Image: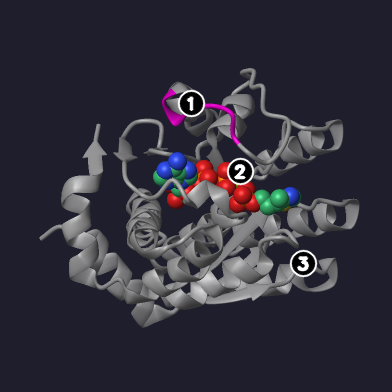
């Protein structure tokens, strides 16, 4: 019998994978709450003195360059090398990597360390593939549909799974691809949701390191479904944020499997 996204959610909750998150100051709190609500165990650590040790004992590592500085970049490289040495999956979130020379150089060094999975918005993935975007900061100005070819190229070039998120999501390992629709228009109205999703991908990848495409789809599906549930009740972005965390905690195996029936297209 094939493993469903609902099975993966149940398995992840049973394991409560330890996810080492090197994420930005904006996202730390939201991402930790998202992981706890979903059933994982987050740890936000970024000191160069300890990241190698911690990355080797965690189930997965996530690296996000949102509030980058030189000491953080040094720690990120040490952590990624440690994850690689201990065969742990690591997820890269290239927040606004196209915005400045410092970020462009940093992302190139991190890509050289071969991330297992890359998750970004459409503008970030288009520019990772060498394309042009009008985006100047952390928010996307491009449609995911315009980033699909770029995602396939980036996946093949770096040997990574690539997830592009937005109104519709697109995930590819360079050969197989999946599109997910749904969610809520309120999702891009609150900060750090994309960053939190990157950490959530780490939770599922850490639980199922041999099924990375499926793990990535499960994380994205949980977000789309939780976004729909929260969006039905929310009065605006503020109440959407806490309702989203509640919704993630409320999703059960059968809810996710039912949602997969209408929110997902396999290409
Ligand atoms: N307009 C939208 N409609 C529905 N879901 C959305 C929309 N924009 C973003 N999302 C969802 O919000 C989450 C964060 O994605 P995104 O906004 O692309 O990340 P980032 O914050 O890195 O730009 C994903 O689950 C994505 O599917
Ligand atoms: C606003 C901001 N500035 C630097 S990092 C950051 C958070 C970006 O979060 P997300 O990409 O998930 O919206
Ligand atoms: Mg982002």
Q: What is the CA distance from the residue labelled 3 to the residue labelled 1? A: 31 Å
Point out the stretch of residues depicted in magenta. Answer: 140-145
150 relative to 141 in the view: left or right? left
Q: Which of the pair 165/102 is nearer the observer?
A: 165
Categorize mark 3 by other alpha carbons within 10 Å: few (<14), some (14-19), many (20+). Answer: many
135 relative to 173 in the view: left or right? right
Residue 123 among those drawn in magenta = no
Dividing the picture into quarters, in which one does residue 247 lie?
Answer: bottom left
The N terminus - image quarter: bottom left
Magenta-colored segment: predominant secondary structure: loop
7 relative to 72 in the view: left or right? left
Figure check: 2 above or below 38: above
- The residue labelled by disc 3 is 46
Give the image's coloring scheme: one colour
Label 2 CB-ligand 3 distance < 8 A = no
Figure check: 130 above or below 225: above
Dividing the picture into quarters, in which one does residue 19 lie?
Answer: bottom right
Categorize mark 1 by other alpha carbons within 10 Å: few (<14), some (14-19), many (20+). Answer: many
For marks 3 and 2, give the one nearer the viewer: 3
Q: Residue at the spot x=23%, y=37% of the render?
A: 266
Image disc number at residue 114 = 2
């Amino acid at each position: 019998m094939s493993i469903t996204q609902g099975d993966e959610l149940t398995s992840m909750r049973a394991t409560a994978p330890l996810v080492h998150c090197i994420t930005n100051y904006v996202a730390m709190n939201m991402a930790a709450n998202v992981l706890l609500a979903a059933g994982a165990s987050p740890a936000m650590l970024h000191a160069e003195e300890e990241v190698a040790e911690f990355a080797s004992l965690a189930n997965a590592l996530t690296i996000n360059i949102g509030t980058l500085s030189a000491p953080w970049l040094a720690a990120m490289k040490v952590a990624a090398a440690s994850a690689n040495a201990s065969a742990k999956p690591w997820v890269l979130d290239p927040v606004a990597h196209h915005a400045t020379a410092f970020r462009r150089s940093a992302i190139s060094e991190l890509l050289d360390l071969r991330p297992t999975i890359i998750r970004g918005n459409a503008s970030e993935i288009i520019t990772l593939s060498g394309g042009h975007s009008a985006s100047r900061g952390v928010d996307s100005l491009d449609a995911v549909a315009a980033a699909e070819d770029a995602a396939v190229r980036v996946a093949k070039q770096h040997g990574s799974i690539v997830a592009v998120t937005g109104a519709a999501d697109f995930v590819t390992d360079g050969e197989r691809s999946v599109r997910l629709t749904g969610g809520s228009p309120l999702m891009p109205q609150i900060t750090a949701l994309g960053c939190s999703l990157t950490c959530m991908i780490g939770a599922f990848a850490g639980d199922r390191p041999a099924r990375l495409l499926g793990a990535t789809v499960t994380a994205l599906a949980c977000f789309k479904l939780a976004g729909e549930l929260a969006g039905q009740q929310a009065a605006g972005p503020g109440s959407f944020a806490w309702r989203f965390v509640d919704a993630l905690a409320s999703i059960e195996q059968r809810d996710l499997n039912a949602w997969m029936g209408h929110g997902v297209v396999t290409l």
